[in-house]
Amino acid sequence: MRKLLLGVFVSLAFALAGYAQTTTSRLSGTVLDPSSAAGAKVGCSNTATGLHFQATTDERGFFQFPSLPPGIYTITAEAAGFSKKVLNDYQLTVSEFAGLVINLAVGDVATTIEVEAKNMARVQTADPQISSVITGQELDALPLGHEALQANRYLPGVAANGGADKVNGTRVGSNSIQIDGVDSVSPLRVQNGASIVPTNVDATGEMRVVLAGARAELQ
């Protein structure tokens, strides 16, 4: 059974999502070396599906993968005159905008330097929104019954309000719900922000809750 990805966009959106515009991830960053990072090749491979994406840095060393399915990736960077850099197990969560700086060292191009990405400190610089991710394991551990959206209520600033939630004091009707990137607010219950489709815990793989500063496509 396919696990859906649930993202909750606060004071404007709850989102249960697969691989639509608002739920794919974006990875951007800079490749740095002692001379010029222009023309470096950056690869991004999904370890679960085998999907591979390729980018070339511009004159500033900048690269971008604008739409990646959430998952775990192997990221590579290489340029003539420098050792190849490999980042293993780099995780992208639902609707994440991630920023990354890759430093290349002068060396033999046949030499590979591997780094475990899960051990890297990650500072969010590519996305202004304030959000939290609730994993599938956490959803399974919480006493939610069958409704995954109830996990919102374990986050600071979110309060239960009947069949929906209030976030940071906003009115309930300001919530919107998306499933696979499609609006799913019930037209009969729009005032309380209820979903027209149940968000079953067993079918939800991951949940993102945006508490403030949500991007334009989530509003």
Image (cartoon, helix red, strand yellow):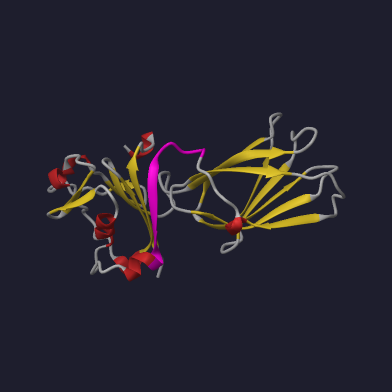
- 8 or 48, which is in the foreground? 8
For residue 32, above or below residue 68: above
Q: Position of residue 25 (x, y in %)?
A: 49, 47
Q: Position of residue 131 (x, y in %)?
A: 38, 46
Residue shown at the point (55%, 48%) measured from the top left:
122
- Please identify the quarter of the rendering in which residue 81 is found: top right
**For residue 17: magenta?**
no
Left or right, residue 142 beside residue 93:
left
Quadrant where the N terminus is found in the figure:
bottom left
Quadrant where the C terminus is found in the figure:
top left
- Please identify the quarter of the rendering in which residue 46 is found: bottom right
- 11 or 15, which is in the foreground? 11
Any part of residue 168 in sight: yes
Magenta part of the chain = 125-137
- 39 or 51, which is in the foreground? 39
Residue shown at the point (75%, 36%) measured from the top left:
39
**For residue 129: magenta?**
yes
